[in-house]
Amino acid sequence: MAHEEHERDRGRVRGRSRRSGRTPAAGPEEDRHPGDTDELARALTAAVRGEVDFSAAGRALVTMDASNYRRVPAGVVAPRDADDVAAALAVCREAAVPVVPRGGGTSIAGQATGTGVVLDLTRHLRDIVRLDPEARTAVVGPGVVLDRLREAAAVHGLTFGPDPSTHSRCTLGGMIGNNACGSHSVAWGTTADNVRSLDVVTYDGRRLRLGPDWAGAPDGLWEFTHAHLAALRTAYPPGLPRRISGYALDALLPERGADVARAYCGSEGTLGVLTEATVRLVPAPAHRALAVLGYPDESAAADAAPGLLAHTPLTLEGMAEDLVRDPAARAGLPRGGAWLFAETGGASAAEARAAATALARAADALDTAVVGDPAAQRTLWRIREEAAGTATRMLDGAEAWPGWEDCAVPPARLGSYLRDFRALLARHGLRGTPYGHFGDGCIHVRIDFDLVSPRGVAAFRAFSEEAAALVVAHGGSLSGEHGDGQARAELLPAMYGDELVRLFGTFKDLWDPDGGLNPGILARPARLDENLRFEALPAAPVDVAFGYPQDDGDFRRAVRRCVGVATCRTTAPASGPAVMCPSYRATGEERHSTRGRARLLHEMLAGEVVTDGWRSTEVRDALDLCLSCKGCRSDCPVGVDMATYKAEFLHHHYAGRRRPAAHYSMGRLPQWLRLAGPVAPLVDALARVGPLAALAKRLAGIAPERELPRLARRSFTALARERARGRTRVLAPGRYTVLWPDTFTDRLAPAVGTAALRVLADAGIEAVLPPGRVCCGLTYVSTGQLDRARAVMRRTLDTVEPLLDLDAPVTVLEPSCAAALRTDLPELLGDDPRAARLASRVRTFAQTLAEHAAPGWTPPRLDRPVAGQTHCHQHAVLGDAAERALRDAAGLTGTLSGGCCGLAGNFGFEKGHWEVSVACAEDHLLPAVRDAPEGAELLADGFSCRTQLHDLGGHHARHLAEVLAQALDRRGGDDGERGR
């Protein structure tokens, strides 16, 4: 019934307007764009003060949200204020073009995608207009990111209660559109529970302020409600704290305050465009504690959850062990196969902990842990918050997708529902990993649907229909948090019946008689198996250079790793070790986020919007500001590796064509430094002559603001061999290493290498150098010269092959080179077993000391604070646990900053990158160094990091090896005999 009604009415915005009488061209909205997009773009540009973007790149960036769906818009408008919203709607109404409001684009059901015009409400409408701590309210624009509101409220001891796991990037407008909830809904309810009034503009230009007692109600709404009171009082299932599906028509009942704002919440952009919201703030507990309760499985945890609600926890979350992939994270959890996370609050830390302890004692759990330390709590919560990304891959690497993402049942029925749901999965031969808000009966799950083949899509439909019936049988809601969108709206008759679903259509018509706002969503919905984003991808694999071992060698699968959860879109300064995504934090533009670039690559493969494949200028320009920091490889919850994708793209983009000058200069840096070596003093002297340096930088494509690095007069290789001349070497098993003379250490910073030799010797570790010239190929990879990179890597393997039989670690002092050897080498030379052997031997300086130092060896004590940065490649690929332990042992206290220095190898040297490079450094590194205590040791193991600190602030940072070697010299070490 619902589908038939949709087929009749889905083209309403293309049919005769009930208000204007115009007769636009016929045809379903989802299947076509406006006939003259150039004319539409011109009209919008003339009407609004914000940005109008009808370019291929602008459209490609918003074809998808975090769902399985893809729809191509005609263009994007970023209105500056409510007047701009009204003006844009007027133009679109005149042209009979549909409009889709969009916030952070993290919707999981497809409601943030559409044809026509997308309104990007995040670029300008993001002001916290007013915050009243006495009234406990805030007035916000729809583009305000939740964490920004929470930070502003925290100053007054307040918070906004609903907190989805995407809190660092989701917007208040999107939360209102989906009636978002989050983990604290057991304490503070849904977004609808925390809304006071809403200002909206309808498609036909009405400006309404919505609130209780029919405030802002469109014409006819009172009559509609009173004509259907019986249906509204009986058709909604009782006992559901998370009933998000459909329109909340029961909020209009007289006994519920006739709250038009509440009825608007969860309408998914189909009724009006939100321009301002007044929301409720709640007191935030001064202190919190976390009780983690272990159970045999998730059903047992779900059975236990309702009994714990009497202890009034702030949260009651559940997850099973198959979402905890990190052994270190698993070690921090109590015994069990599934866990409940119950947070408690209090006026003091002792009060919060006492509440958590009482709850844990009352729980019938296998094992419990009560955590009071805020940092430890954040670590545990991170496991839960990243589940939306972690769940996109099964344990064996198979893809898993939303589609049956967030149903809810009465909490008392949750355990029974989960057992039945697992049985349903088994009957369909599917796998999924349920987790979510057990205290509210709301479950998230991603399932290994085959959404590519026709047979798999048919199976997806069949499962969805059966799952809907199962949820209804348990008295539940098809959506318990993320809304229905395209994923579930078609199934609403199973939950509500045909009569109420017909009323949904009438309700929408009262607000939007032209059907211009987000058609195909909620009322008269599109089919759940239409507009799937995988349909547009090529049927055959794409020929690529990298091996993509995590994606079975399939670049299509690598690109579709990005599911849109947008962890990369946070604009907050990097905290802790996080790196991703420095260019987005610098520019705030979607195309400079990891997600934005992945979307452009997806559209490049699809060929509909971005039509020139690997030659695409849209993709090239978006990737130009990618620093290849590799942060997404570790920080993205689904492991998108944009540095590799960028190298792949550049390889194809410039195949057979002239490259930018920087690719020839810095991309082939090892070659030029080797040639310059014999005349290094002369080259260095000429580089200090202003006009010559300016000419050289212009010819090499180097930013004029950069100072050319100084060449070493003697290479580290020469110094090391001179040091070893005449010495008798005894290579004791397990007590020697191959010390890798990377290009940066060898030709630009030999003092790092000699310092490492000094410390290794003191630790009783003999270092040997490769017998010939070696190179990891990093600079060739980062500029996409992959054929040259493979040739360099094969020559390197030929050189080091005899050393691979020694079963010794390969110590690499430059983190970026170590990361290249660990990842790029085996992924480019997957056909050469030597590549994997070498990659497995790679160790950082600190890792070698941790694993091979002589028994009883300790580093010299320095007892001073540190500042500086962990190299982004080290964070992403190698980890820094050994470095932290070594610093602790040496009495170097404090933590190094996260983020990226902004120089990132060739990136910060390239012409046109100076401003972004500086902005990245100012994000975290430079403030951390400026705030460092007096006498702090500045540490930066990466040559780029040290260079950036010098160039931007005159700071002298050193490699950890240099700091330790100097301390050894001061204590009068005996050149290594101590550790033997």
Image (cartoon, rainbow, N blue to C red):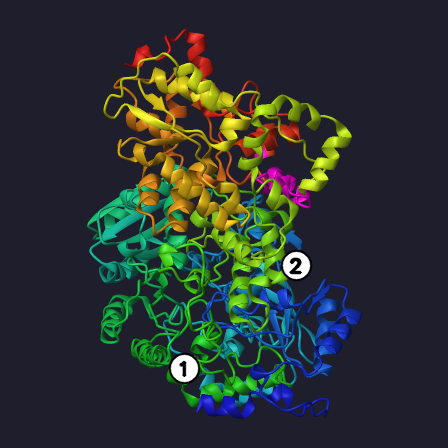
**Is-magenta flag for residue 841?**
no
Q: Residue furthest top?
A: 972
Helix, strand or loop for disc 2: loop
Residue beneath the point at 25% across and 69% down: 422
Residue beneath the point at 51% across and 85% down: 524
Q: Is residue 205 above or below residue 666?
A: below
Q: Is residue 880 above or below residue 520?
A: above
Q: Amino acid at mark 1?
A: Leu
In the picture, measured across the screen, residue 638 lies left or right of residue 619, that is left
Q: Position of residue 200 (x, y in %)?
A: 65, 71
**First-in-chain label (1 vs 2):** 2
Location of residue 547 by image quarter: bottom left
Disc marking residue 123: 2
Pointer 1 residue: 491
Q: Position of residue 210 (x, y in %)?
A: 63, 71
Residue extent of the magenta highlight: 903-925
In the picture, measured across the screen, residue 188 lies left or right of residue 945, that is left
Task: Give the class, few, some or many, for how many residues have Cα within 10 Å of label 2's Cα (few <14, many ≥20).
Answer: some
Q: Nearer the viewer, residue 217 or 167?
A: 167
In the picture, measured across the screen, residue 408 lies left or right of residue 621, that is left
Q: Amino acid at mark 2?
A: Arg
Task: Give the class, few, some or many, for how many residues have Cα within 10 Å of label 1's Cα (few <14, many ≥20).
Answer: many
Cα separation between marks 1 and 2: 34 Å
Q: Nearer the viewer, mark 1 or mark 2?
A: 2
